[in-house]
Image (cartoon, rainbow, N blue to C red):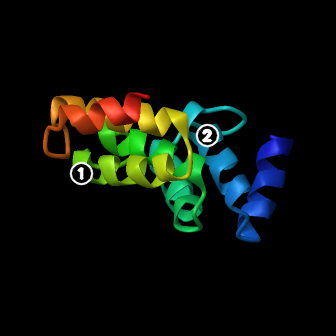
Amino acid sequence: GKAAELYRQAVDQGRADAQNSLGVMYEEGRGVEQDTGKAAELYRQAAGQGHALARFNLGQMYEEGRGVEQDLGKAAELYRQAAEQGDADAQNNLGVMYDKGLGVAQDAGRAAELYR
């Protein structure tokens, strides 16, 4: 669709917000054919530029093994980066990972800090 085309142009200019938005469209199949691999690649580009939401989105893909091979360690690292940027969802997800010892050493104290 038209929105996807405008996002593609912005992506070509290296705009992280557009990379993340187009990634969401590919992940959910909105205006474009669903393609989780393409979504993950767009999130990776935006995350590489320090985009917090893209780091969170890519973390979810790694946690669930969607569009990428599941890697809980990578998921935890991406959540940590986004959490340090103030992303509340990333803080929560990272808390769960510490709580359950997923991709990180189990640490109830660290989990409690992240849940605050």
Name the spot of residue 40 as percent of width and height, x first: 47, 51
Using the image, tell me which numbered label, if any, was put on residue 27: none
Q: How many marks?
A: 2
Hey, which quadrant is residue 29 in on the image? top right
Classify the position of the N terminus by image quarter: top right
Within-10-Å neighbours for mark 1: few <14, some 14–19, many 20+: some
Question: Quick check: 33 above or below 38?
Answer: above
For image coordinates 56% across by 56% down, the residue present is: 42
Direction from residue 18 to residue 27 in the image, left or right: left
Q: Nearer the viewer, residue 50 or 7?
A: 50
For image coordinates 57% across by 51% down, the residue present is: 52
Name the spot of residue 88 as percent of width and height, x first: 53, 35
Direction from residue 67 to residue 14 in the image, left or right: right
Secondary structure found at label 1: helix
**Where is mark 1, residue-wise?**
73
Q: Amino acid at mark 2?
A: Val
Q: Amino acid at mark 1?
A: Gly
Q: Nearer the viewer, residue 74 or 35?
A: 74
Residue 84 visible here: yes
**First along the sequence among labels 2 and 1:** 2
**Where is mark 2, residue-wise?**
24
For image coordinates 65% across by 39% down, the residue present is: 25
Residue 71 visible here: no
Q: CA distance from mark 2 to mark 1?
A: 22 Å
Name the spot of residue 21 as percent of width and height, x first: 69, 45
Secondary structure found at label 2: helix
